[in-house]
Image: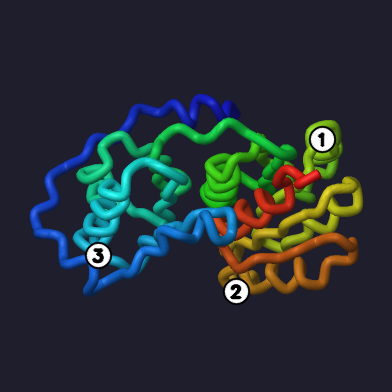
Amino acid sequence: MSETTRDEAVPHRPSDIRQPPPDLAAIADLDHGRAGRRGYPEAIYCEGKTPPQVAAIAAAVRERGSGPVTLFTRADEEHAKAVLAELPDAHYDTEARLLAWPPTAPSPTGGKVVIACAGTSDIPVAREALLTARYLGRATELIVDVGVAGLHRVLGKLDVLRAARAVVVVAGMDGALPSVVAGLVAAPVVAVPTSVGYGAAFGGVAPLLSMLNACSPGVAVVNIDNGYGGGHLAAQIAAPSDG
């Protein structure tokens, strides 16, 4: 699978937003100083917000001017239309349901973040982690379909995994992959459970518990389907050292 091909997909064009955006002060208090305070900017979680609310936030981001990247996460098609109406050049990844503005990721610094994805069904969450780490300034690489049902596949990617400063492992079903990867690499592993799996996976609870009970040390776990959280933590781990 070519990561470049996915990122160079045909851009989405904005459509008219029929409802006027609400007064921003009534819905949000944007934290424009977060990047200066803790090194990483605020992201906008779109799920649960209406398109007009997202449009008002995007307009405020535009008025602030280009600066640290703003990510809009969990954006469905209507959310994306609302953002693109205000920020027409924003990058929109339909699979990750993520928009980024400014659209060009910063030049990478620090160490590399590798995202290992257990199965094809986990790719949307894996791509959210990938793009989060990339837009926070890290070199990134995605490897897919390396689940434990075929251990030869992950063993065939050891050179990539061992070159990483941090590894994000995204998996559903039994959630065994992070423990396997952590036993093969020196870098910290950020485990992201997904809601992929049959009924006894309980919407991601089973892989979450497996990851929390990982036998291998050096595994940190974020919440179910939280690709943004996994990518963010990995970007922080792989940040340039002050020395």
- N-terminal of the pair, mark 1 or mark 3, is 3
Q: Position of residue 191 (x, y in %)?
A: 71, 59
The answer to whether the residue labelled 1 contacts the one labelled 3, judged by CB atoms less than 8 Å apart, is no
Left or right? Give the position of 52 relative to 80: left
Q: Disc 2 to disc 3, how far (Cα)? A: 28 Å
Q: Disc 2 to disc 1, how far (Cα)? A: 34 Å
Residue at the spot x=31%, y=51% of the render? 61
Query: Tag on residue 94?
Result: none
Query: Tag on residue 50?
Result: 3
Quarter holding the N terminus is top right
Mark 1, secondary structure of its residue: loop
Q: Nearer the viewer, residue 234 or 62?
A: 62
Task: Identify the residue position indicated by label 1 in the image.
Answer: 163
Q: Position of residue 18 (x, y in %)?
A: 8, 54
Q: Residues within 10 Å of mark 3 (few under 14, many from 20)?
A: few
- Residue flagged by tag 2: what amino acid is it? Phe
- Residue flagged by tag 3: what amino acid is it? Thr
Q: Position of residue 96 (x, y in %)?
A: 47, 47
- Give the colouring mode of the picture: rainbow
Query: Tag on residue 202?
Result: 2
Task: Please tell me whether residue 219 is drawn above or below residue 90 in the rendered image.
Answer: below
Residue at the spot x=41%, y=58% of the render? 32
Q: Disc 1 to disc 3, how far (Cα)? A: 42 Å
